[in-house]
Structure formats: structure tokens, C-alpha cells
Image (tube, rainbow, N blue to C red):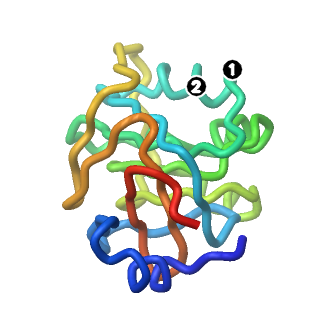
Amino acid sequence: MDFFTADICDEHFDKVITLNPDFKNYGGASKCKGEVVTVKLDKNNSELIKILRDEDGTGKVVVVDVREEYFAVVGENLMKFAHQNNYAGIIVNGYIRDTFQIKDIPVALYALGTCPHKYIPTTEGERGVHLTFGGASFDNGDYIYADTDGIIVTESPLV
């Protein structure tokens, strides 16, 4: 991919919002860009599974907000689904697991940290909702650029 978030920020400083630096990339891709798909979860990842397993993710980055609980919502199986369906990346305002297994799957995966425990009982998630976390807001159709310098959000593609 031929972009750097620092260059985009310099060239379009008035059109970008920077997500706070609490997010670390655990995936096998060092950067990603794409159209935002939003999902809000209540501990369980069943709604996210449907998105990653069943839908074409070409040119898309899934932005996930999780109710403030310490459970993992993305691991090896979901990363395999994301890769099989061509998602560029996943950004999780929450926790992930299976870091040893996912480090070689060529999808970017940004998260707050890790947790070995997932939440088993199925709960409902919400898709296509406005999300706000980490100093940024996300809506379906926004655009994400993420690399080793950070994650930025724009209303439309800039490069």
C-alpha cells in the first residue's frame, strides 16, 4: 500500500481525525485502508462473525466497539474469515486473543490489548451505528487509514 498516515495528515490536516495512540496492531498486515463498516457488540462476537464470515470485505475496514468488559472478540477464526473475504483490517475498541496464530494472517488488527477469555453466551450486536471512542467518531462509509504511526479517520478517501 502506497500511503503513510503522517503524509496524509500533513496534506489534509483539516480533513482527518486521529484515533488516540492506545491501539496496537496485532495482525499480519502492517497497514490498512478502506471504507468503514461499524458494529457495536455486547461482549459476544456473533454479529461480527456474520459480517466477517458472510460478506465481501474488499476495500473495507470493520470498526468494532465493545461494551466495556474484559473479553476477547477477535481471534484466529475471525481473522481467517476476514482474510478469506478480503477485509483490509479490523479496529477493535476492546480486546483480542490468539496473537501467536494471527500474527501471520495478512489482515491488520488494531485493538486495545489481549485477553484469553471470550464471552460464550450469545448477545445481540448492532450494525451500521454511529460509534465514538478513542477521540474519534465512525460512521458507515467513512474511510480509515492505519499504519505504524497511527489510525486516522476521514469522511471520504483522500489518496
Element assignment for label 1: helix
Q: Is residue 120 left or right of residue 112?
A: right
* Quadrant assignment, res 27: bottom right
Number of the label disc, if any, that sits on residue 143: none
Q: Residue at x 33, y 66 (%)?
A: 16
* Residue corresponding to mark 1: 54
Q: Secondary structure at mark 2?
A: helix
Give the image location of residue 112, x and y in percent.
35, 60
Q: Residue at x 47, y 20 (%)?
A: 47
Which residue shows up at 19% across the image and 61% down it? 135
Rate crowding at label 1 as few (under 14), some (14 to 19) or many (20 or more) other CA atoms within 10 Å. few
Which amino acid type corresponds to the residue marked 2 in the rendered image?
A: Ile
Looking at numbered disc 1 in the image, what kind of residue is underneath it? Asp
- Residue 26, compared with residue 61, is above or below; it is below
Image quarter (top left, top right, bottom left or bottom right) of the N terminus: bottom right
Q: Count all numbered tags in the image, as a single digit.
A: 2
User: Which of 70/112 is in front?
Assistant: 112
Q: What is the spatial separation of the Cα atoms under label 1 and label 2, in whole angstroms?
A: 6 Å
Q: Is residue 142 above or below residue 101?
A: above
24 left or right, relative to 55: left
Q: Quadrant of residue 99?
A: bottom right
- Where does the image place residue 7, in percent across and percent down from the top left? 49, 85
Identify whether 27 is placed above or below 149.
above
Camera-side residue: 144 or 150?
A: 144
The residue tagged 2 is 51
x and y, in percent, of residue 114 in the image: 43, 57
Using the image, determine if residue 157 lies above or below residue 20: above
